[in-house]
Image (cartoon, rainbow, N blue to C red):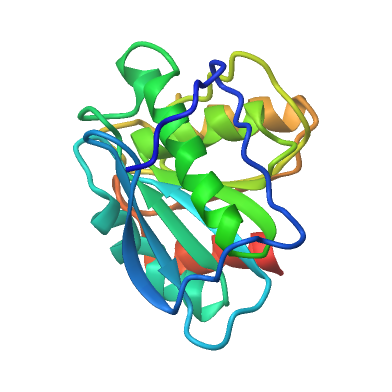
Amino acid sequence: MTALPNAAEERLAARPVSTPAAVPYPPGSRTLELGPHAHAQLVVPDGPPRPRPLLVFFHGAGGTAAQSVDLVGAPATAREALVLAPSSVAATWDLIAGGLGRDVAVLDAALEQVFARQRVTGVAFGGFSDGASYALSLGLANGDLAEAVLAFSPGFASPPRRVGRPRVWISHGTDDRVLPVARCGRRLARELDASGYPVTYEEFDGGHVVRPTDVTAALTTWLG
């Protein structure tokens, strides 16, 4: 198993390299073992190895990496993107549970493994519900790594500090009973826009869900 690096709060140390040293992962899905009770799913598109973008997607509270892959795996790999779906060590992400640390270290270890074997052309963070709040918080703190954040029904953004100016895409249902749109997605979009971030905001008639059409729209905003 890979030893976890020390995480300095919200900052991720792993970065893509121009010439990965190890043999690329073959197409398909696999589990990355990252230490005790820590793992992530990596999905590689079909076809020969080539430089590809990477979507890191965080599940909602009580969710799993497999659920993240079910939500975004097929549409992302159809666009030639790698998908990295980490699992939170506890029931939800460390930021929501009390403070950044363990899950950041696990993500850093996962990214190090991916960057050591895959040529990555760009990185986006995405997530649903608690995972969307985590993607926003971690993405805004690591905008020198994440060029975009794709947030489906987020509750908040709480980066300890902000680095860079990633593009932000947010969707939220007008009938969301879990994280009401007025104090969550709508407020976040307004505040981030006022702070100078390039924001795309989509509301839809519905509840606390991720719609396939929104996944497609988010990927298009990121990948063009």
Q: Is residue 182 visible?
A: no
- Residue 42 lies, with reference to residue 2, above or below; the image says below
Q: Nearer the viewer, residue 18 or 12?
A: 18
State the quadrant of the C terminus: bottom right
What residue sits 69% from the left and 57% below the top?
122
Q: Nearer the viewer, residue 224 or 170?
A: 224
Q: Residue 88's spot in the image, x, y percent?
A: 30, 35
Q: Residue 15's spot in the image, x, y percent?
A: 67, 44
What residue sits 22% from the left and 44% below the top?
63
State the quadrant of the N terminus: top left
What residue sits 59% from the left and 55% below the top?
116
What residue sits 59% from the left and 80% below the top?
49
**Residue 172 falls left or right of residue 91:** right
Q: Residue 95's spot in the image, x, y percent?
A: 40, 20
Q: Residue 167's spot in the image, x, y percent?
A: 71, 45
**Residue 187 falls left or right of residue 13:** left
